[in-house]
Image (cartoon, helix red, strand yellow):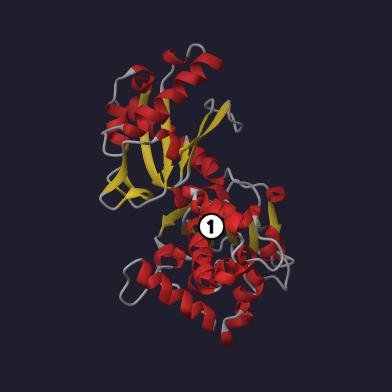
Amino acid sequence: VGDIGGTNSRLAIYNETDKEAIFVKHYPNQKYLENLTEPGIFESSIVKPFLEEVQSTKIPDLDKSLLVACLACAGPVRKNTVTMTNIGFDYEPLVIDGTRIMADGRGLLGNIVRCTIINDFVAQGYGMLVVDKEDVLELTPGSWKMVDEEGPKACVGAGTGLGECYLTPHGDGEFMCYASEGGHVEFCPRSGLEVELWDYLKKKFDGTHRISVERVVSGRGLANVYEFLAMRFPEKIVETVHEEFLKAGDLQGKVVAVNATEGSLCEHAMHIMISAYGSEVGAASLKWLPTGGMFVTGGLTPKNIKYIQGADSDFMKAFHDKGRVSPLLKTIPLFAVMVEDIGVRGAHYCAQKELRLWKKDVESM
């Protein structure tokens, strides 16, 4: 199974009945995916080497096994194919095709009998169904007691980009997860400085009337915020940090977070990004009313929990700042997910479902 994000691809392999992975490996996309226009570059550069490493280190007879795969990918999925939202450019995006992977007979790729592509936040959503209580923090005190087991659930998470999904119950204990592109709704500035930020980003990204909230709430969004603040307050630039930022490529957001010392431009950027994060989670909660739980996931959440947790945090104040409907948000169970493998767990959940379907198909032949 795989969780394929904008920055990293996380792959894991499981035995049919095991909950724990036999082997897990992370691949930095920038390092392993160079020529994005090459057909099958993802399976050639990541999936095939992963399976070869599994065989050489963990499962010597892997070539005698049949493999069912589920890849959770950051982008809209159509006909078992995804065009990745945050890898490559508009003119050179990465395309991952599950049907093509199944048809690829090279080496251990030929052992894959089923390969299903799902949206990465569909995987995050299904991961919520198997998350352990010790893996989450209550952001609203008493959230576990408020959970309606038959109510809808929702998930919002910032990483390289911003993802959102929701789950609805089916009455038999099962939930169906639905993807969305909610991270691309409009960013709504909440202060005079944020109006200036909005105008700056609108010009930077050639927007006429709007920018998406992901331009602010994400790792890349954090970099955008810092870039704006450095332009707006040049006297506050720390040259060593700024130079490191300019050379960091896809890791600019990390440079900002690591250097967010008290009173710095980086800390200011963190406050703006986290406040916008809380505001968007609050907006999503009003739209979906997830009485079964709103789960805040993504790589930025556990790394920056000190800005998120607590009634007086930037995140929580923005979450509740919804005017006359603010009291409604006190009834929504709100959790921060403190582990980063929820996408892999959700992909594993879906892979098990796909395995059952494949077995049924084989039995009916």
For this rendering, which residue is in front, 15 or 263? 263
Quadrant in which residue 52 is drawn: top left
Given residues 245 and 114, the one toward you in this image is: 245
Q: Nearer the viewer, residue 351 or 318?
A: 318
Where is mark 1, residue-wise? Answer: 157
x, y percentage for residue 248? 51, 48
Above or below for 235 versus 153: below
Tell me if 151 is positioned left or right of 147 in this view. left
Residue at position x 56%, y 30% in the image: 24
* x then y, percent, for residue 277: 56, 67
Residue 353 in sight in this render: no
Which x, y percent locates residue 345?
55, 41
| Residue 298 rendering spot, x and y as whole percentages | 55, 53
- For the residue carrying disc 1, how many other residues have a C-alpha within 10 Å: few (<14), some (14-19), or many (20+)? many
Q: Secondary structure at mark 1?
A: strand
Q: How many marks?
A: 1
Q: Residue at x 41, y 56 (%)?
A: 179
The amino acid pointed to by label 1 is: Gly
- Quadrant in the picture for residue 70: top left
The C terminus lies in quadrant: top left
Relative to 124, say whether 355 is above or below: above
Identify the residue shown where x is 51% and y is 40%.
Answer: 349
